[in-house]
Amino acid sequence: MSVAYFVLDDGRIFEGRSWGAVGKVFGEAVFQTGMTGYQEVLTDPSYHKQVVVMTAPHIGNTGFNHQDNESSRIWVTGFAVRTPSTLTSNWRSEKDLEQALIDQSVVGIQGIDTRAITRHLRDRGSMRVGIFSGLELSREEMVIEVRKVESMSGAFLVADVSTPHAYVVPAVGVKKFVVAALDLGIKSATPRALAARGVEVHVLPFNATIEEINELNPDGVFLSNGPGDPATMNVIIDLVRELLLQEVPIFGICFGHQIFGRALGFETYKLAFGHRGINQPVIDRSTGKVEITSHNHGFALKAPADREFSTVYGRGEVTHISLNDGVIEGIRLLDRPAFSVQYHPEAASGPHDAAYLFDSFLELMSKKVHG
């Protein structure tokens, strides 16, 4: 086991030990506050080009298995933990976590103070980082390499994570609706959640055209989560505007929420350190109910602070607000069947407070189909 370094672009360096693959990787340093669900984090395409720091100190005790994957591979660029489990204890486990990282060439680091890193990122904001494992480099050389890394602002990443070909997730039981899901980095739990409600889901590449969507004659369109800067998504934003003119029911989450908001004419902005975890409190303004929700985003929507707003597509309202920092977490149109939230209703590793949003989507489609 060799020495490894976690090197931030402001010059701060944390020394630890190698874990997973050996080498060097670079990305945006972000922290994840979930105490469970590390495998869902690792395989979530929204973490593409990011080095994830787990705030929970003990990671890996349930090992790794193919059933809990949210995609076909691990997407995080690097993985930082304080104490990896020395024992894998779960009947579903197929290998230990470190072996999974090695098998997919993911460079990790262990034995560092992840609480100190988290506090540093909360004070200074997310920044570029490198993990250097088993390499002979000076501290100055490592910092110089990290500072050459491109920022997440302006990053166009969906082409890396989207499916190259359309595929279908069949409805479970009686087919009630057909949905076209635009894959911007979709998690596998999302089409499963829709399929369980009787929806046949056609998952389409990010660059699907309006003609390809219309050929399916879908009852609704879903805009998935994904990585990168929503300001780079002009083609997809224009596609959403065409769908709004056709009054097709639309449901967007996470990255899809930001794209939906930009299609309505709002701006997006980079958060200081983002929301990443399964313990984020959000209030539903229509009911006053507080939901504990799953998040993974570094950008947010800049919409009017007042509850209602006007767009070229009619009236709209802000439906959900973060109770941690007041970030807008949900919007909907009042004159067209379209809404979005900034978080993950499928929440594969929990919690499931927001699962009702899939039912809300089905209600919109039912009204469109049955009047």
Image: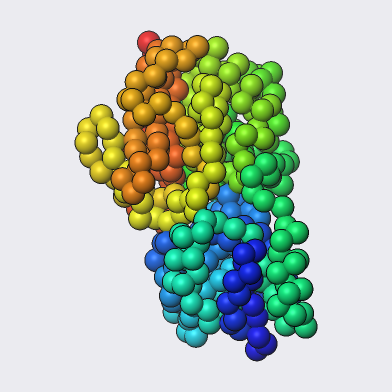
**In the displayed structure, would residue 350 be above or below residue 211?**
below
Quarter of the C terminus within the rendering: top left
Q: Residue at x 43, y 12 (%)?
A: 314
132 relative to 289 in the view: left or right: right
Q: Residue at x 36, y 29 (%)?
A: 305
Can you see residue 199?
no
**Quick one: which residue is furthest to the bottom in this view?**
1
Q: Residue at x 63, y 18 (%)?
A: 214
Front-most of residues 139 and 363: 139
Q: Residue at x 45, y 51 (%)?
A: 275
Front-most of residues 283 and 65: 283
Q: Where does the image place residue 265, in percent across and percent down from the top left?
A: 53, 21
Q: Where does the image place residue 294, in percent across and percent down from the top left?
A: 41, 50
Front-most of residues 239 and 49: 49
Answer with the quarter of the image where residue 33 lies.
Answer: bottom left
**In the displayed structure, would residue 75 be above or below residue 225?**
below
Which color scheme does this rendered protein use?
rainbow
